[in-house]
Image (cartoon, rainbow, N blue to C red):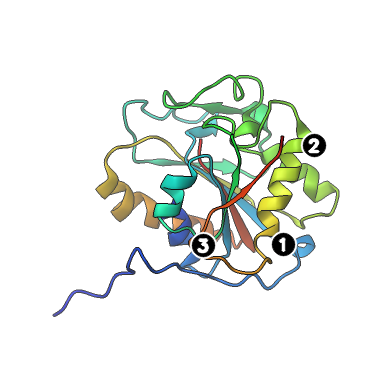
Protein backbone atom coordinates (compact mmCIF):
# COMPACT_ATOMS: atom_id res chain seq x y z
CA UNK A 1 0.00 0.00 0.00
CA UNK A 2 1.54 3.31 -1.06
CA UNK A 3 1.38 6.30 1.26
CA UNK A 4 -1.42 8.75 0.41
CA UNK A 5 -0.23 11.85 -1.40
CA UNK A 6 0.49 14.86 0.79
CA UNK A 7 0.04 18.46 -0.28
CA UNK A 8 3.37 19.89 -1.42
CA UNK A 9 4.38 23.02 0.47
CA UNK A 10 4.62 24.73 -2.94
CA UNK A 11 0.91 24.11 -3.47
CA UNK A 12 -1.44 26.60 -1.83
CA UNK A 13 -4.89 25.38 -0.73
CA UNK A 14 -7.55 27.89 -1.70
CA UNK A 15 -11.29 27.91 -0.96
CA UNK A 16 -13.20 30.70 -2.74
CA UNK A 17 -15.22 33.05 -0.53
CA UNK A 18 -18.71 33.08 -2.00
CA UNK A 19 -20.64 35.14 0.53
CA UNK A 20 -20.87 38.82 1.18
CA UNK A 21 -18.83 39.81 4.23
CA UNK A 22 -22.03 41.21 5.77
CA UNK A 23 -23.48 37.68 5.71
CA UNK A 24 -20.40 35.88 7.01
CA UNK A 25 -19.97 34.23 10.41
CA UNK A 26 -16.35 34.63 11.43
CA UNK A 27 -14.23 32.34 13.64
CA UNK A 28 -11.05 33.57 15.32
CA UNK A 29 -7.98 31.31 15.55
CA UNK A 30 -4.70 32.32 17.16
CA UNK A 31 -1.28 30.98 18.09
CA UNK A 32 -0.77 33.72 20.66
CA UNK A 33 -1.36 31.55 23.76
CA UNK A 34 -4.78 33.07 24.55
CA UNK A 35 -7.28 31.35 26.87
CA UNK A 36 -10.20 32.10 29.16
CA UNK A 37 -8.89 33.23 32.56
CA UNK A 38 -10.63 30.28 34.23
CA UNK A 39 -9.21 27.75 31.76
CA UNK A 40 -6.00 25.73 32.18
CA UNK A 41 -2.87 27.83 31.48
CA UNK A 42 -0.56 26.91 28.61
CA UNK A 43 2.82 25.52 29.65
CA UNK A 44 5.21 28.33 28.76
CA UNK A 45 8.16 26.08 27.87
CA UNK A 46 6.10 24.24 25.27
CA UNK A 47 2.50 23.07 24.93
CA UNK A 48 0.90 21.26 22.01
CA UNK A 49 -2.66 21.51 23.34
CA UNK A 50 -5.20 24.13 22.32
CA UNK A 51 -7.95 26.02 24.10
CA UNK A 52 -11.53 26.71 23.09
CA UNK A 53 -12.87 30.19 23.79
CA UNK A 54 -16.63 30.64 23.90
CA UNK A 55 -18.13 33.14 21.48
CA UNK A 56 -19.59 35.14 24.38
CA UNK A 57 -16.10 35.92 25.76
CA UNK A 58 -14.83 39.48 25.86
CA UNK A 59 -11.15 40.44 25.86
CA UNK A 60 -11.29 41.19 29.58
CA UNK A 61 -12.17 37.50 30.20
CA UNK A 62 -8.96 36.36 28.52
CA UNK A 63 -5.41 35.68 29.69
CA UNK A 64 -2.28 35.14 27.64
CA UNK A 65 0.49 32.63 28.45
CA UNK A 66 3.58 33.53 26.47
CA UNK A 67 7.23 34.50 26.83
CA UNK A 68 8.06 34.97 23.14
CA UNK A 69 6.62 38.33 22.14
CA UNK A 70 6.33 41.83 23.54
CA UNK A 71 3.47 42.21 26.04
CA UNK A 72 3.23 46.01 26.14
CA UNK A 73 0.10 45.90 23.97
CA UNK A 74 -1.72 42.86 25.38
CA UNK A 75 -1.17 43.90 29.00
CA UNK A 76 -3.62 46.72 28.24
CA UNK A 77 -5.74 45.16 25.51
CA UNK A 78 -5.85 41.48 24.44
CA UNK A 79 -7.49 42.66 21.20
CA UNK A 80 -3.92 43.45 20.07
CA UNK A 81 -3.50 39.73 19.29
CA UNK A 82 -7.04 38.36 19.66
CA UNK A 83 -9.51 40.98 18.41
CA UNK A 84 -12.72 39.41 19.71
CA UNK A 85 -14.24 42.69 20.95
CA UNK A 86 -13.50 44.36 17.62
CA UNK A 87 -15.16 41.56 15.64
CA UNK A 88 -18.21 41.85 17.87
CA UNK A 89 -18.25 45.58 17.28
CA UNK A 90 -18.11 44.96 13.50
CA UNK A 91 -21.03 42.55 13.90
CA UNK A 92 -23.05 45.23 15.72
CA UNK A 93 -22.29 47.57 12.82
CA UNK A 94 -23.45 44.81 10.41
CA UNK A 95 -20.09 44.73 8.63
CA UNK A 96 -20.03 40.97 9.36
CA UNK A 97 -22.97 38.72 10.27
CA UNK A 98 -21.49 37.62 13.58
CA UNK A 99 -19.03 35.40 15.38
CA UNK A 100 -19.06 31.63 15.70
CA UNK A 101 -19.96 30.07 19.04
CA UNK A 102 -16.36 28.99 19.59
CA UNK A 103 -12.89 30.34 18.85
CA UNK A 104 -9.54 28.61 19.24
CA UNK A 105 -6.01 29.31 20.40
CA UNK A 106 -2.80 27.39 20.71
CA UNK A 107 0.40 28.26 22.52
CA UNK A 108 4.12 28.00 21.92
CA UNK A 109 5.66 24.65 21.03
CA UNK A 110 8.86 23.47 19.41
CA UNK A 111 7.42 19.98 19.00
CA UNK A 112 6.56 20.74 15.39
CA UNK A 113 5.85 17.12 14.49
CA UNK A 114 3.18 16.71 17.16
CA UNK A 115 1.73 20.13 16.30
CA UNK A 116 1.55 19.24 12.60
CA UNK A 117 0.33 15.66 13.04
CA UNK A 118 -2.05 16.07 15.98
CA UNK A 119 -2.82 19.63 17.12
CA UNK A 120 -3.36 21.22 13.72
CA UNK A 121 -5.77 18.54 12.43
CA UNK A 122 -7.69 18.71 15.74
CA UNK A 123 -8.03 22.48 15.50
CA UNK A 124 -9.03 22.33 11.82
CA UNK A 125 -11.78 19.83 12.63
CA UNK A 126 -12.94 21.85 15.65
CA UNK A 127 -13.05 25.01 13.52
CA UNK A 128 -15.06 23.23 10.82
CA UNK A 129 -17.49 22.07 13.54
CA UNK A 130 -18.40 25.69 14.30
CA UNK A 131 -19.47 26.12 10.65
CA UNK A 132 -17.80 29.48 10.00
CA UNK A 133 -18.04 31.26 6.64
CA UNK A 134 -14.54 32.64 7.13
CA UNK A 135 -11.68 32.30 9.59
CA UNK A 136 -9.42 35.12 10.76
CA UNK A 137 -6.05 33.96 12.07
CA UNK A 138 -3.57 35.88 14.17
CA UNK A 139 -0.10 35.02 15.41
CA UNK A 140 1.45 36.89 18.31
CA UNK B 1 0.41 29.61 12.07
CA UNK B 2 0.22 29.13 8.31
CA UNK B 3 0.15 25.36 8.91
CA UNK B 4 -3.12 25.80 10.82
CA UNK B 5 -4.43 28.18 8.19
CA UNK B 6 -3.71 25.79 5.33
CA UNK B 7 -5.35 22.91 7.24
CA UNK B 8 -8.53 24.95 7.79
CA UNK B 9 -8.59 26.09 4.15
CA UNK B 10 -8.30 22.44 3.10
CA UNK B 11 -11.57 21.78 4.99
CA UNK B 12 -13.29 24.08 2.50
CA UNK B 13 -13.32 27.18 4.70
CA UNK B 14 -11.85 30.47 3.40
CA UNK B 15 -9.18 31.89 5.71
CA UNK B 16 -7.09 35.02 6.08
CA UNK B 17 -4.05 35.53 8.29
CA UNK B 18 -2.83 38.73 9.93
CA UNK B 19 0.91 38.23 10.25
CA UNK B 20 3.75 40.25 11.75
CA UNK B 21 6.37 37.82 10.42
CA UNK B 22 5.86 38.28 6.66
CA UNK B 23 8.95 36.44 5.44
CA UNK B 24 8.34 33.41 7.61
CA UNK B 25 4.64 33.39 6.65
CA UNK B 26 5.36 33.74 2.92
CA UNK B 27 7.72 30.77 3.03
CA UNK B 28 4.88 28.64 4.38
CA UNK B 29 2.60 29.84 1.54
CA UNK B 30 -0.64 31.10 3.13
CA UNK B 31 -3.94 31.12 1.19
CA UNK B 32 -4.37 34.84 2.10
CA UNK B 33 -2.30 37.00 4.41
CA UNK B 34 -2.03 40.65 5.44
CA UNK B 35 1.11 42.20 6.96
CA UNK B 36 0.54 45.57 8.63
CA UNK B 37 3.95 47.10 7.83
CA UNK B 38 6.27 47.64 10.74
CA UNK B 39 4.06 45.90 13.30
CA UNK B 40 5.85 43.47 15.60
CA UNK B 41 4.86 40.31 17.49
CA UNK B 42 2.44 41.13 20.27
CA UNK B 43 1.10 44.08 18.29
CA UNK B 44 -0.62 42.32 15.37
CA UNK B 45 -3.58 44.71 15.49
CA UNK B 46 -1.56 47.82 16.30
CA UNK B 47 -1.99 49.85 19.45
CA UNK B 48 -3.86 48.98 22.69
CA UNK B 49 -7.33 50.47 22.88
CA UNK B 50 -7.16 51.89 19.34
CA UNK B 51 -10.47 50.43 18.24
CA UNK B 52 -10.61 52.32 14.95
CA UNK B 53 -7.16 51.10 13.84
CA UNK B 54 -7.83 47.53 14.96
CA UNK B 55 -11.14 47.40 13.07
CA UNK B 56 -9.54 48.95 9.98
CA UNK B 57 -6.92 46.19 9.93
CA UNK B 58 -9.54 43.47 10.47
CA UNK B 59 -11.71 44.81 7.65
CA UNK B 60 -8.67 45.00 5.35
CA UNK B 61 -7.79 41.40 6.21
CA UNK B 62 -11.38 40.19 5.69
CA UNK B 63 -11.43 42.23 2.47
CA UNK B 64 -8.76 39.91 1.08
CA UNK B 65 -11.34 37.09 1.17
CA UNK B 66 -13.15 38.55 -1.82
CA UNK B 67 -10.16 40.23 -3.48
CA UNK B 68 -8.36 38.87 -6.52
CA UNK B 69 -6.65 35.70 -5.31
CA UNK B 70 -2.92 35.92 -4.62
CA UNK B 71 -2.41 32.53 -2.96
CA UNK B 72 0.93 32.12 -1.25
CA UNK B 73 1.58 35.86 -1.07
CA UNK B 74 1.64 38.17 1.92
CA UNK B 75 0.04 41.55 1.20
CA UNK B 76 1.85 44.38 2.99
CA UNK B 77 -0.07 47.57 3.85
CA UNK B 78 0.84 50.74 5.67
CA UNK B 79 -1.22 51.87 8.68
CA UNK B 80 0.96 54.70 9.98
Helix, strand or loop at label 3? It is loop
Residue B29 circle label: none
Q: Which residue is mark 3?
A: B31
Few, some or many residues within 10 Å of mark 1 (<14, 14–19, 20+): many
Q: Position of residue A18 (x, y in %)?
A: 68, 73
- Between disc 2 and disc 3, whose residue precedes? 3
| Point 66% across, 32% down: residue | B46
The answer to whether the residue labelled 2 contacts the one labelled 1, judged by CB atoms less than 8 Å apart, is no
Q: Which residue is mark 1?
A: A24
Let me know if residue A10 appears in the view: yes
Q: Which residue is mark 2?
A: B52
Tally of numbered tags: 3
Cα–Cα span, label 1 and label 3: 18 Å
- Residue B55, by quadrant, is top right
Q: Position of residue B48 (x, y in %)?
A: 69, 25
Q: Position of residue A68 (x, y in %)?
A: 42, 26
Few, some or many residues within 10 Å of mark 3 (<14, 14–19, 20+): many
Amino acid sequence: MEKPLELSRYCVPFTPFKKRLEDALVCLVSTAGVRKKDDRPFVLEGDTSFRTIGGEAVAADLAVDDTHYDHACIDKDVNCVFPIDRLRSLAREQRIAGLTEQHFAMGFSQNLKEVRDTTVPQIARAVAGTRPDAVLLTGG
Amino acid sequence: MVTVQRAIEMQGIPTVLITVEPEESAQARPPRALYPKGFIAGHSLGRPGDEALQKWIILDALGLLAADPRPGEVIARDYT
